[in-house]
Image (tube, rainbow, N blue to C red):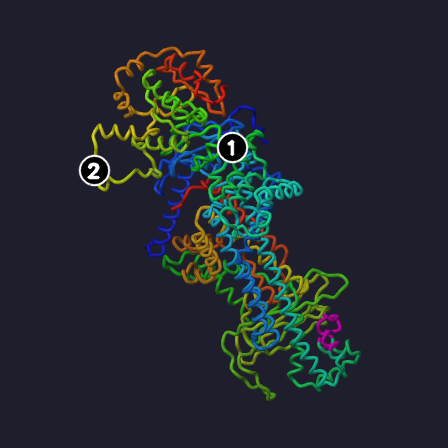
Amino acid sequence: MIAPSARSPVVECAALTKVFQDFWGRGRVRAVDDLELSILPGEVFGLLGPNGSGKTTTIKMLLGLLYPTRGYARVFDRPPTDTRVKAHIGFMPEESYLYRFLNAHETLDYYGRLFRLDRRERRRRTEQLIQMVGLRGAARRAVGEYSKGMARRIGLAQALINDPDLLILDEPTTGLDPIGARQIKDLIRELARRGKTVLLCSHLLADVEDVCDRVAIMYGGRRQALGRVRDLLSRQDVTQIRATQLDERTVARLRAIIESEAGRRVLAVEHPTQRLEDLFLSIVEQAERDRLATSGVEAARGVSEFLSAGPPGGGAELLETLVAAGQDDVSAAARPEEAVETRPTPVPRFEVLEQLTTEEHAAAFAAPEDRPSGPADETETEDAGGPRPIRLPPGPAPRRDVLERLTQPDEQQSEPQA
Amino acid sequence: MWAVDAFDVSVVLVLALIALSAVVIVIAALARGGGEVGGWEVRGAWPRVRAVARVTLAEAVRMKIVVVFLVLLAGTLPLLCLTARGDGTIRGQVQMFIGYAIGLTGFYLALLTIFFSSRTLAAEIASRQIFGLVSKPVPRWQILAGKWLGIMTLNALMVAMALGVTYGGVRWLVGRFERELAAELVHRGGLTRDQAEGGINAIRRPVSPAREAATNPVIAALAGSLGWSDDQTVELLLRLPEPTRMNLRRLNELRRQVLVARASIQPDAPDLRNEVEERFELLRQQGRLPTSPHWTPDKVREEIRLSLLNEHLSLPPMRARQWVLKGPPPVSGEDRLVSVRYKLDASIYTGEAALIDGSVLPENTLATRWIIGDPAKGGTFGVVRIEINRAFHEIDVPPHCVEPDGTVFVRLENIDPRRVDIVVPLGEGLEVLYRVASFERNLARAAPALLVPLALLASFGLLMSTFCTYPVAAMVTLSLFAVANSRAFLSEALYIAPYQASPTTLIGRDALRAKLTTTLFDVLSTGKLDPANKTLDGRAIGWAELGREAGTVAGLRGGASLFLAVLILRRRELAAEIV
């Protein structure tokens, strides 16, 4: 039996490539291209991407259902087709691939036997799992009669029957009602707390954002982004100050300070809504703009040219769209290196943005100053109601006096200081 | 001269196609990396194999496949029982029912096995249910073993049920006949019901052969049961109408010749090599050997052998022949029932003939005299028979005519006044039969005999389904079954080898053709056991024979198919789509 060692990666992929061939051996579909991935024990890892980006193909290679064309994958430091490895894996597939003629009890009992559990243990786990997934009432009905949600629940139960060290979930919350989805998320968190490793594959970005420690985003079979969720979702070129509810006057004063004294633009004053979904879409858009190859679905893009109103615009119109997009169009190149590994993209067209800045802004950009220490610490400790600390870009740093102004208590303010 | 004909061209094309496909498949499989790693451990395999077998059995039962075949069998067998006629006699009825019942069971179950074994794995792969199985620590050979075991368990249950119904049907048929016969004895013979039933039962039990030798088995049985003397019993029989007496005799035959398991000893085929050489030498000396190049010395010898064989086997009018058969092994204690069974062949159709005493020899009959026992010792048993030509007949041999070491002397005299040659064919022409087991035991042995070809079909179906879809796998396996079952017909249709020629005499193209096709048929064969014919004929299915067939058919060929299936399944990318 294999004992997974403490800190060696549970899953490791290096240059993992899968090219599907047709009957005559010609390469037809490059489903996974040069994938590098490493999942450490105890973490919850999310694999995201649009349809056809290679997520499920990767998972199938990790389970030994497909063999790589190039590169390799290793699970618990062994090839995925090694049968001994499977004793530690639980797999919940996207569709219900269960035997229609068995009922829930018999299904779990069957899989329990395959893991060579003795009768008592099998019975105990079966009862507990059926209870956990809420199928007690339907436990003696044939699985073929189940609704989709019920089938997915039993699919989850069979993935857990062997108390796996690595749980692979393909679209776990699809087909489940919100209660079921919440249950799964809680379960994932609980398993992670117990030291299990979870590999999660999903389209439902909100769910991934809630539970995952790290995510990888795939497009066209290649990994486009990888990193901690928190890091990926943070934006370094924008400073977000989260305060408890401010009145209009304070907001106006802040705006004046930022614009006139600090010489920066106020992008938006609103209640924070950034979600993973935006990041996801922006990456896909970037990839499409860069005309990266994909064998999957391409995101729908607006209206066809001949159908949209007005002639196609030049530079000014481009500016309008870019500015009006607000939080869209993040420059991938602006992110700091150490927190995130991103595919090096070709020259971004967002250089247009830089050209649009005024002279004085250009000066500020050109002369980076040292990071202020004192006020920055103070700033970071101001934490009423749990907003995130302010992160400052290492490049052009805001001026100290501006920060002091911002953090000085105003007579008009009624909120308590931290 | 080897003139190429359509047969040769098609054989070459087919073989080339198969070879090419095999090469392409093997190269493609080896070129692609991957495949199952490890998994060959046998320890701990049994619980998993058993689990897969259980689910396979559940699949068959719950997916209603089994129900269809159950209905077929359960519906057809009783129907057969009710409508079986045969030649109108009880013996014919029972034989027809047994033959068809076992034959149909074998056929239906072969179809069930073919379709189910082709489907179970292929459908699981196509519907991706196999993902759930393969993501568990189950080596792929255990999956195949489990499926095979599940299929064979299903077959075993169905065979047991079918044989049970067959046995029930036989008992019902015979029971009905016996009840009618008992009623006849009561009404026409004046016996009480108990006496009649007792008498019928007595015919069922094989009475001491010594007793039977003195008189007629029927008389002996009835006399013994009723406690009467032989004369009294004969009087009773004379009171009965002729059909009833016939029925009594037929019941006796049924009990002794059909509902029983008997082993057979046949005379060896004569070794004529010396005679052939002598004749050949003679012809050569006389300069009468054929000169055409077509007639090689081997061919000439074969012709000589054939004609000598014919001479040997035929009995001219007013001639006799003696056989010494190494009979059954001696048994101490109980008497053993031995009989001589024969099927003679008159060279021409015998018309009616009148004898000098005014009696008439019916048409299509042969008049023969049989003398059984060592003539040197005296005390032989002789009987004259006038019987239908080309039919099986039996003579019960009194025990004192069987030598202590089991040897049986049989002498046949051709006394037919119509002056015909009688041919005693090889094989079924003459044999000594002796009882080794009961009908019930034989029927029980028919079960493994039926299962052996099913095991091969299951293995082959599983092999096909590892790389084909269900319909293709089913079709190929069905073709195998069809070819294996039509061997005789196909041999004749393709004119593979001239009748009765020994392989050594064929030369060149004919030899190659014969060798190729016989090898193909041997490989594809589903076995030579024929439980239907054996059981209806009252012949024992021997353990040695059973073991041999099980070893070669199910063990060797079935095992090879399964092994190949394992190799293929291990390499297969189960998630790759086959378009």
Report the side of B308 relative to A233 (left or right).
Answer: right
Specify the label residue B7 is tagged with. none
User: Which residue reaches farthest front?
Assistant: A412
**Chain of the residue displaying label 2:** A
Q: Is residue B469 above or below residue B235?
A: above
Badge 2 marks a residue whose secondary structure is loop
Quarter-wise, where is residue A361 in the image?
top left
**Which residue is rendered at x = 55% and y = 75% of the image?**
B389
Quarter-wise, where is residue A202 in the image?
top left
Q: Nearer the viewer, residue A375 or B182?
A: A375
The question of residue B209 being in magenta is answered with: yes
The disc labelled 2 sits on which kind of residue? Gly
- The residue pinned by badge 1 equals A198
**Marks 2 & 1 on one chain:** yes
Q: Is residue A352 above or below residue B32?
A: above
Quadrant location, the N terminus of chain B: bottom left
Q: Nearer the viewer, residue B181 or A330?
A: A330
**Which residue is rendered at x = 25% and y = 40% of the image?**
A304
- The residue pinned by badge 2 equals A310
Badge 1 marks a residue whose secondary structure is strand
Segment tinted magenta in the rendering: B197-217
